[in-house]
Image (tube, rainbow, N blue to C red):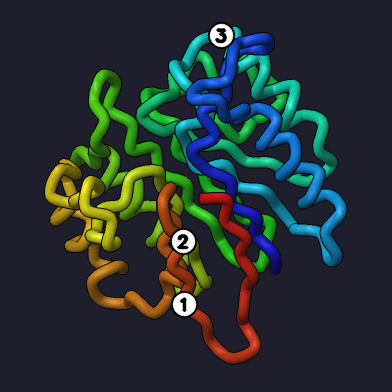
Amino acid sequence: MIIAQITDLHIEAAGHRPAHGFDVNASLAAVLRRLESHTPRPDMILATGDLTAHGDDSEYDALAALLNSVDIPMYIMPGNHDDRDGMRKAFPGHTYLPKGDYLHYVIDEFPLRIIALDTLAPGLVDGTMCPARCDWLTARLAEAPSRPTVIAMHHPPADIGIGWLHSGNFAGRDEISEIPLIKIQPRNIRANNYSKLFVLYRRPNQAATVYNTY
């Protein structure tokens, strides 16, 4: 299985002057062209948050125009620069996005089971896993305890060697580590997919390939 992770896109409205002289929209377009031409092609693209610069409708319109041009299964998640309602509005065809308070979902149709976690706390930069979100994750892991699983989230709940991303600012960090199937059976958690990093654990004959834009 080949997973292409794209993240921290910070897409701007069409016609907006590139920030700091760097055209993020053109960069994403180039990445998507590269993925479409890659041999073998990725089985899916997973966009793990900070999809837009400010969560504005015009930015989501520009993002949708770019992502909808690609003929590869596409899954999107929110980061701290995103707006849940804005994402739902811009991507009505992405029916896996739920209508509730959080944009959690599970992707079951691939060899790896992917659990997407919404760690967004509106108005805050840092991630959050409140009790309700931890309960949701616990329930999803319990549904298929023996399946190889990827847990994807925008904010890293563990230190990954980037100083300004200190996990001590992640509310609920300790609670995640105490979830039974993470604490007792960590070998079934095949990867922890954060916006800034993708850590992949391999087993013989059950490997995955990951491309990461960060």
| Numbered badge on residue 40 | none
Question: For the N terminus, which image quadrant?
Answer: bottom right
Three-letter code for the amino acid on which mark 1 is drawn: Tyr
Front-lying residue, 89 or 10: 10
Three-letter code, disc 2? Phe
Front residue of this view, candidates 43 and 132:
43
| Residue 89 seen from this side | no
Which numbered disc covers residue 57? 3
Q: Is residue 167 left or right of residue 90?
A: left
- Asked which quadrant contains residue 73, the reply is top right
Distance from the alpha carbon under mark 3 to that under mark 1:
37 Å
Question: Residue at left 19%, top 44%?
Answer: 170
Q: Decide: marks 1, 2 in contact (CB < 8 A)? A: no
Q: Which residue is mark 1?
A: 201
Q: In terms of depth relative to the viewer, which is nearer, 160 or 76?
A: 160
Q: Is residue 181 left or right of residue 43?
A: left
SS at mark 1?
Answer: loop
Alpha-carbon neighbours of circle 2 within 10 Å: few (<14), some, or many (≥20)?
some
Q: Secondary structure at mark 2?
A: strand
Q: Position of residue 134 (x, y in %)?
A: 26, 47
Work out whether residue 30 or residue 92 is closer to the camera in this orientation and state it. 30
Q: Residue furthest bottom?
A: 204
Q: Quadrant of residue 129?
A: top left
Task: Check disc 2 and report the residue beneath it.
Answer: 198
Amino acid type, residue under disc 3 in the picture: Asp
Q: Earlier in the sequence, mark 3 or mark 2?
A: 3
SS label for mark 3: helix
